[in-house]
Amino acid sequence: MNDLYRPGGFSMMPPAVKNLLLINIIFFLATIVLQNRGFDMYAIMGLSWVESENFRPWQFITYMFMHGDFTHIFFNMFALWMFGYLLENFWGTRRFLIYYFVTGIGAAIVQLLVNWYGFNQIHEVIEIYKSNPNVADFTAIVQKYFVGRVYVDINETNAFIGQWQMNQADLSFVSASFGRLEDMMQSAMSIPMVGASGAVFGILLAFGMMFPNQRIYIYFLFPIKAKYFVIAYGALEFFFGISGAQSGVAHFAHLGGMLFGIILILYWRNKYRFRR
């Protein structure tokens, strides 16, 4: 674990990092081109919830090469290069790639477990609602679980609620509310997870463990040691994750990448120590 890998000398752009950057950029450009032609790569390559009709097993890998916009891919690729090239020089290309994909897949697994808990909770709430449907509870469910999280036409939904409030004796609104909640659930489950962030956070964790005293400049202004930077970033991700901030960011996927990263590094360290 501590032997510096130098088959051809130290490189600022070692092969794994270089090829990961190229593949991500190619996927990003292909997504834009194909989307303009009516082909949705997000539905095929992004990681959908396992109950979604779009889910495919290969998405555990392909989701890592998909990104939502230029800012998303830019910061992920910048971090991949900034922290990744040192790790690849330190570990070697094979070990670096194993680590990258293990943390990326681990991030997906953790996020899906979190989604499973969340969707089960919503399913239970909807089943309780169905036993005593009413406009007040329908409104509360929509506001708490769906507005801001899925593609809900809020104006149209508010118009439906307003009509129901004025015609509460009309039972057709009850059956309509069931259908609307089902559509919202399907919409929520069909939103794919995309991005290399889980693997990048795994790389960040590894950087902090391999080079704990290396100084990182925050926004190029002031330095902080890598180990403290990783701890602070992990704490922020945990806070945002448990706070339920509706930002569209998979905070638990980031934490999952770090979790699988530390497990793999500790496994390698024990394996190396015992071999000695």
Image (spheres, grey):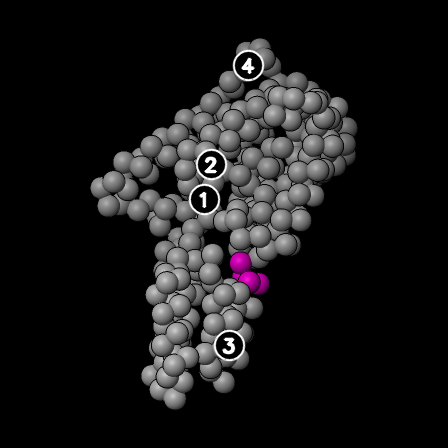
Callout 1 touching callout 2 (CB < 8 Å) = yes
Across the whole image, how many numbered discs are drawn on residues? 4
Residue at the location (40% across, 73% down)? 161
Residue ranking furthest to the top: 9
* Quarter of the image where the C terminus is located: top right
* Quarter of the image where the N terminus is located: top right
Q: Which residue is mark 3?
A: 137
Q: Nearer the viewer, mark 3 or mark 2?
A: 3
Callout 3 touching callout 1 (CB < 8 Å) = no
> Crowdedness of circle 1 by 10 Å Cα count: few (<14), some, many (20+)?
many
Q: Nearer the viewer, residue 4 or 186?
A: 186
Q: Nearer the viewer, residue 43 or 163?
A: 163
Q: Label 1 to label 2, Cα distance in Å? A: 10 Å
Q: Which residue is mark 2?
A: 72
**Which is more N-terminal, label 2 or label 3?**
2
Callout 3 touching callout 2 (CB < 8 Å) = no
Q: Label 3 to label 2, Cα distance in Å? A: 37 Å
Q: Amino acid at mark 3?
A: Asp
Residue at the location (53% across, 58% down)? 115
What range of the chain is rendered magenta? Answer: 115-119
Q: Which residue is mark 4?
A: 11
Q: Amino acid at mark 4?
A: Ser
Q: Label 4 to label 3, Cα distance in Å? A: 60 Å
**The label number, if any, that marks residue 79 in the structure image:** none
Q: Nearer the viewer, mark 2 or mark 4?
A: 2
Q: Amino acid at mark 1?
A: Val
